[in-house]
Amino acid sequence: MIKFVCAKDYDEMSRKAANVISAQMIMKPNSVLGLATGSTPIGTYKCLVERYEQGDLDFSQITSVNLDEYRGLTHDNDQSYYYFMNDNLFSHVNIDKNNTYVPDGTIADADEACKQYDAIVAASGGADLQLLGLGHNGHIGFNEPAEVFPKGTHCVDLTESTIKANARFFASIEEVPTQAYTMGIQTIMSAKKILLVASGADKADIIEKAFFGDVTPWVPASILQLHQDVTVVGDEAAFAKIIDKI
Ligand code: F6R
């Protein structure tokens, strides 16, 4: 079942998404949180940090498993997702960093890196709540449009549209890594709950396609229509094309 929560703007979307994560943490203090990077969840992480600072949230028993990482970026590279997570969340709350996991982009052997990460996710028991952003081409994690839905962690060649979208964070487009390790669709779908956040008019088309179009690996997020517990928190701009249907 998909529940749509429409927010006025980015800030309200962030607060509402943080509400869902906070509720999960309060109801189950030792939750496994599946986490995402990208621009969209930055405000959500900021809200979580504020609530931690106010004494309302406790991360001490939380385990986190991130969706993806660029292949080849070291942990101290400020564009690595490892760096992003520390910078935006982990360094500001009382999470035990030994319980935070991001696919290891420094492992050159892709099969080994993916095998190791699948074992980590399996050992964690899987995500109680998986946070997702949404790519303009419908990707979730870095599961790009393809002929089939990939199952476990795998190495992907990023599409041109993803490389272009991510170039804004790098000095030049040539510096954007062309490959990433990402959790697979089966792993994402195994999360007990899913929370997808989307903001801005540029996401309106893909929100409509993903949640009201056909379920197809050419729009990877469309598989979420088959999950039993999905909450989509979006702002009015991102929901512009679905507002009459929800
Ligand atoms: C990030 C990730 C990606 C992003 C997506 C949207 O860990 O897995 O799927 O969620 O590319 O990115 P933004 O939020 O920057 O539009």
Image (tube, rainbow, N blue to C red):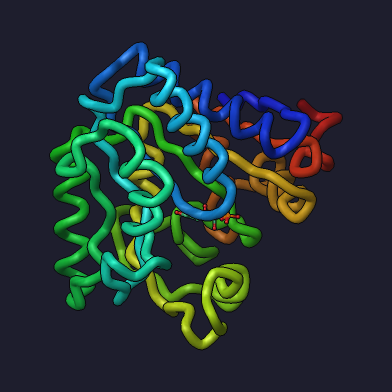
**Quarter of the rendering containing residue 91:** top left
Q: Is residue 211 left or right of residue 175?
A: right
Q: Is residue 102 above or below residue 50?
A: below
Residue 42 position, x and y percent, is 53, 45
Left or right of residue 243, residue 6 in this image: left
Name the spot of residue 216 as percent of width and height, x first. 57, 53
Q: Is residue 27 above or below residue 4?
A: above
Depth check, front residue: 25 or 34: 25
Instruction: Count the numbered circles shown.
Output: 0
Front residue of 177/14: it is 14
Name the residue rendered at 59%, 27% in the picture: 15
* 24 left or right of 63 in image: right
**Residue 33 locus on image (x, y percent):** 34, 34
- Residue at 36 percent across and 46 percent down: it is 186
In the displayed structure, would residue 196 be above or below residue 119? above
Q: Residue furthest right?
A: 244
Q: Quadrant of the C terminus?
A: top right
Furthest residue in direction bottom, as rendered: 174
Residue sitting at 56 percent across and 24 percent down? 1
Q: Which residue sits furthest top? A: 27
Residue in the picture at 40% in, 25% down? 53
Q: Position of residue 146 (x, y in %)?
A: 50, 66
- Left or right: 85 in relation to 120: right
In which quadrant of the rendered view does residue 93 lie? top left
